[in-house]
Amino acid sequence: MYNKIVTLTEYLLKEEQKFEKATGSFTLLMTTLENAVKIIASHVKQSGLVDILGKTGSTNASGDEVKKLDILSNEILVDCLSQSGQAQTLASEELADAISLENNGHYMVYFDPLDGSSNIEVNVNIGTIFSIYLNDKNILQPGRKQVAAGYIIYGPSVMFVYSCGQGVNGFTLDPSVGTFLLSHPNIIIPEEKGIYSFNESYEPIFHKHTLKYLKDVKNSEKKYTSRYIGSMVVDVHRTLLKGGIFGYPSDKERPDGILRLMYEVNPLAYIIQQAGGLAFSEKKNPLDITPKQLHQRVSIVMGSKKEVNHYQSFLS
């Protein structure tokens, strides 16, 4: 039987019809984002063939070492989104300050242009993360006010996963026609898989509750599997599709955590919760945190409800 092919653009237009006051601005913004990440995907595929690998010798606003492909990806997103006319504010993990554009755009867009860039030189999957808010004079908005969020995975195939508050859907790029096609409709995070994703090299500085949790899962009758790639977006993507838990908790040396609230944690926590999972940061839903600064760091644990609740049981 023939199954109707649904493109990302078609899906966006169909979703837009559900909102009486829709103006088409959101669809234009998402289409611009789609075009930008296609360009990034093309450069990622050529990363071993042209001189865009390696370090720039500088660090970004968050203090991380910047890779050449980081800079290129950031420039592509800033240029495309600026020209779209739909976003009035842009904020990137790579930039110290937000960019305020002189237009009448309805949205603020926050993004990590290339998450997991430390893995570029070893050809491991990486991705782009984005978060969208309605335009506001205060750029420090809690994640609960996101109107949409998502990520793009650059791997054996390129996937565009997003939610605008109506569940989570995944689209895979068909390279033969250059179009994202609906491949993973209505994603629901599985509950039964025993997969945990923590960077256990930090075990000497983990807090006691994290150590107790890890010891418990390793000795559990339920057979757990450890999976950790080192690109947050990729580890969370696997958790979303396969189930389990992803954690980057605070520790004795980093009491505030390491991941960025507005660029990484909020959008991915939004996706996980839209898919039926849970996320928390130091006993609080990260989406309820009002940011104090643009590059604020927080701890995070997210994944299947059962697994996150299991981890939380050790906090007491």
Image: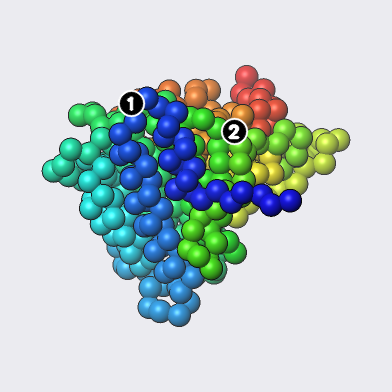
Q: Residues within 10 Å of mark 2 (few under 14, many from 20)?
A: many
In the displayed structure, 313 sits above or below 106; it is above
Cα–Cα span, label 1 and label 2? 26 Å
Q: What residue did someone put label 1 on?
A: 21
Earlier in the chain: of badge 1 and badge 2, it is 1
In the displayed structure, 105 sits above or below 122; it is above
Q: Secondary structure at mark 1?
A: loop
Instruction: Evaluate whether residue 199 shows in this view.
Output: no
* Quarter of the C terminus within the rendering: top right
156 on left or right of 30: right
Q: Residues within 10 Å of mark 1 (few under 14, many from 20)?
A: few
Where in the figure is residue 231, as x and y percent of width and height?
53, 53
Q: Give the residue displayed 13% in from the left and 43% down from the top.
A: 102
Instruction: Evaluate whether residue 123 shows in this view.
Output: yes
Where in the figure is residue 150, as x and y percent of width and height?
47, 43
Instruction: Please tell me the numbered disc located at residue 275.
Output: 2
